[in-house]
């Protein structure tokens, strides 16, 4: 892939920290918990994943007959996610968060060494039905602002984080020290 080639070349010249390195420094190295058969060692969840309670139910994007009142995410983000959703409720924006598409999920990559930020439980997918890859998306600007105020960005930063497939995610912004 062209993008990978470019990153490899710049790494040789400048050795800048990659997005994945920044994620590992902040949230731990999930790669070390991948077992020889490609599955995730349950110790990863024990050590790094916790549950956060939601102040209002969210419909499951893959089954609108069900909703969740909690979800699994990285331990370092539980209080941040809790305050984000509390703020969404306080600003009466909850109707604009139409569905929950997942947060922590380990999806082994057969064709790439890059893991999704969902492996760390730091990306949260919201309203994925109307925010498919390649579409302009329709996430509400006020919801984006609530997340942005908490340090998250909406979609579109895949090259920096290793999130290659989801455009319906809020991902914490991890700033690169030597961005060229
Ligand atoms: Zn995602």
Image (spheres, rainbow, N blue to C red):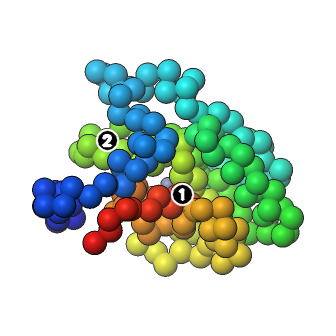
Q: Residue at x 30, y 22 (%)?
A: 37
Residue 151: give x, y in percent of width and height: 60, 62
Q: Is residue 177 left or right of residue 122?
A: left
Secondary element at image label 2 = loop
The image shows residue 71, relative to residue 1, as above or below, that is above
Residue 142, image quadrant: bottom right
Compute the Cα span from label 1 to label 2: 22 Å
Determine which residue is flagged by label 2: 109
Residue 49 lies in quadrant? top right
Return the x and y of residue 163 as percentages of the image width and height: 40, 55
- Using the image, determine if residue 35 lies above or below residue 17: above
Q: Identify residue for label 1.
A: 172
Which quadrant holds residue 40? top left
Q: Nearer the viewer, residue 2 or 67?
A: 2
Q: Is residue 136 above or below residue 160?
A: below
Q: Position of residue 96 (x, y in %)?
A: 74, 69
Q: Can residue 84 be seen here?
A: yes
Q: Quadrant of the N terminus?
A: bottom left
Q: Residues within 10 Å of mark 1 (few under 14, many from 20)?
A: many
Q: Is mark 2 within 8 Å of ligand 1?
A: no
Which residue appears at 64% of the width and 33% of the height? 50
Q: Nearer the viewer, mark 1 or mark 2?
A: 1
Q: Nearer the viewer, residue 64 or 11?
A: 11
């Amino acid at each position: 892939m062209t993008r990978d080639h470019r990153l490899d070349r710049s790494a040789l010249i400048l050795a800048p920290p990659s997005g994945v390195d920044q994620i590992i420094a902040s949230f731990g190295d999930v790669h070390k918990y991948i077992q020889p058969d490609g599955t995730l060692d349950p110790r990863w969840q024990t050590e790094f994943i916790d549950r956060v309670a939601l102040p209002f139910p969210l419909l499951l994007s893959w089954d609108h007959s069900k909703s969740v009142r909690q979800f699994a995410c990285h331990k370092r983000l539980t209080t941040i996610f809790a305050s984000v959703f509390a703020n969404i409720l306080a600003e009466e924006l909850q109707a604009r968060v139409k569905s929950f598409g997942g947060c922590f999920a380990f999806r082994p990559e057969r064709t790439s060494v890059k893991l999704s930020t969902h492996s760390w439980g730091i990306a949260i997918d919201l309203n994925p039905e109307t925010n498919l890859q390649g579409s302009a998306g329709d996430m509400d600007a006020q919801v984006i602002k609530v997340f942005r105020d908490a340090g998250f960005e909406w979609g579109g930063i895949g090259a920096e984080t290793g999130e290659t497939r989801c455009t319906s995610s809020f991902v914490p912004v991890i700033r690169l020290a030597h961005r060229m």
